[in-house]
Image: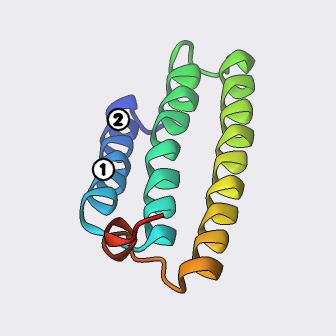
Amino acid sequence: MISVTFYIAVATMLFGLGLYCLATKKNMIRLLLGIEVMAAAPNLLFIAFSAAKEPGLIDPLAHVFVVTAIVIDGSLVAVGLALTIAVFRRFKTIDVRELRRLKW
């Protein structure tokens, strides 16, 4: 069985990768992908901690929280993509640096 420390390390790497993507990328779609990767890290930790409480038993409450978080994340990405499409149709760019220079 894989220990909880492995899952903590993987979740930390996922969160760091998402944070790196948010800090360095200027494309709006890549920013949304970074947010999604960052949102996957706590979900992984919830499931890992629910399975590590007692060997052989899994707490279903953590699964309920993770499914709810996945639905909320999906809604967030849908709104973000709709906003990205609207911005692209109006300004013909999805580069954040160029959009900051524009006056609405």
Residue 80 visible somewhere in the drawing: yes
Q: Observer-nearest residue: 64 or 80?
A: 80
Tell me whether circle 2 and circle 1 mark residues in contact (CB < 8 Å).
no
Q: Is tag 2's residue or tag 1's residue first in the polypeptide sequence?
A: 2
Spot occupied by residue 26 in the image (x, y as percentages of width and height): 34, 71
Which residue was labeled with disc 2?
A: 8
- Residue 29 is tagged as none
Q: What element carries label 1?
A: helix
Rendered image quadrant of residue 69: top right
Spot occupied by residue 61 in the image (x, y as percentages of width and height): 71, 16
Hey, what amino acid is under mark 2? Ile
Q: Residue at x 38, y 42 (%)?
A: 11
Q: Residue at x 47, y 68 (%)?
A: 28
| C-alpha span from label 2 to label 1 | 9 Å
Q: Residue at x 43, y 39 (%)?
A: 2
Q: So how many labels did they put on this image?
A: 2
